[in-house]
Amino acid sequence: MSAHAMYQTAVLLDFDDNRVGAELQLPVDRLSISFRQTVDAEHLPLEKDSLRQYVLGHVHPVAQDGRPFIVEFIDQAIQTVENAPYLVVHLMLTPPKGASVGHFMLNYDVIAHEIVTHVVLISIRSDKQHPIPANDPVLLGMIRYTKLSQDIDRMKR
């Protein structure tokens, strides 16, 4: 079984002790529509700063008390995922002081703010405290239509 069907986004979360890595796998055909510019290997060097700002503008995790997480942009690259071109973006999510990394709300609408039929699958790929079998991410939920946030609870699996 594949991680996600063509044209879907995958958000893969990697839990560390006090922060969460997030890998966004964004189909470039859908991303080009929502970003309103061509996204491919040729254009990426020219658009990388704009793409960085676009992604950061659409990923807003918040603690249970509503305080925002710090979202750090790590890198981005065009990669082939399931025989299709995707922009793979790595982020680091750090909770505000005193908040738990284990339970938060992920407000997310990359691509989905423009393409209402777009599906975003959100999964936990790894967790240092609660091991997950390799290559078998735990699906937490999906973002689509008017549901643009997902409760992230690393204990619910």
Image (cartoon, rainbow, N blue to C red):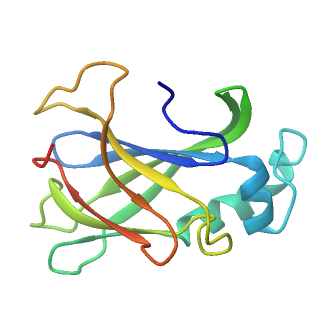
Pick the residue in front: 23 or 3: 3
In the figure, 112 relative to 123: above or below? below
In the figure, 110 relative to 75: above or below? below
Q: Residue furthest right?
A: 42
Pick the residue in front: 95 or 126: 126
Q: Residue furthest top?
A: 134
Q: Give coordinates of residue 133: x percent, y percent.
A: 25, 20
Q: Give coordinates of residue 75: x percent, y percent.
A: 58, 43
Q: Residue sitting at 53 percent across and 70 percent down?
A: 58
Q: Residue sitting at 12 percent across and 60 percent down?
A: 100
Q: Give coordinates of residue 94: x percent, y percent.
A: 29, 57
Picture mark count: 0
Write down the quadrant of residue 113 in the picture. bottom right
- Give the side of residue 56 with respect to residue 94, left or right: right
Write down the quadrant of residue 76 in the picture. top right
Write down the quadrant of residue 49 in the picture. bottom right
Q: Residue sitting at 85 percent across and 63 percent down?
A: 37
**Quadrant of the drawing holding the C terminus:** top left
Q: Give coordinates of residue 8: x percent, y percent.
A: 59, 48
Q: Residue sitting at 82 percent across and 69 percent down?
A: 36
Pick the residue in front: 95 or 111: 111
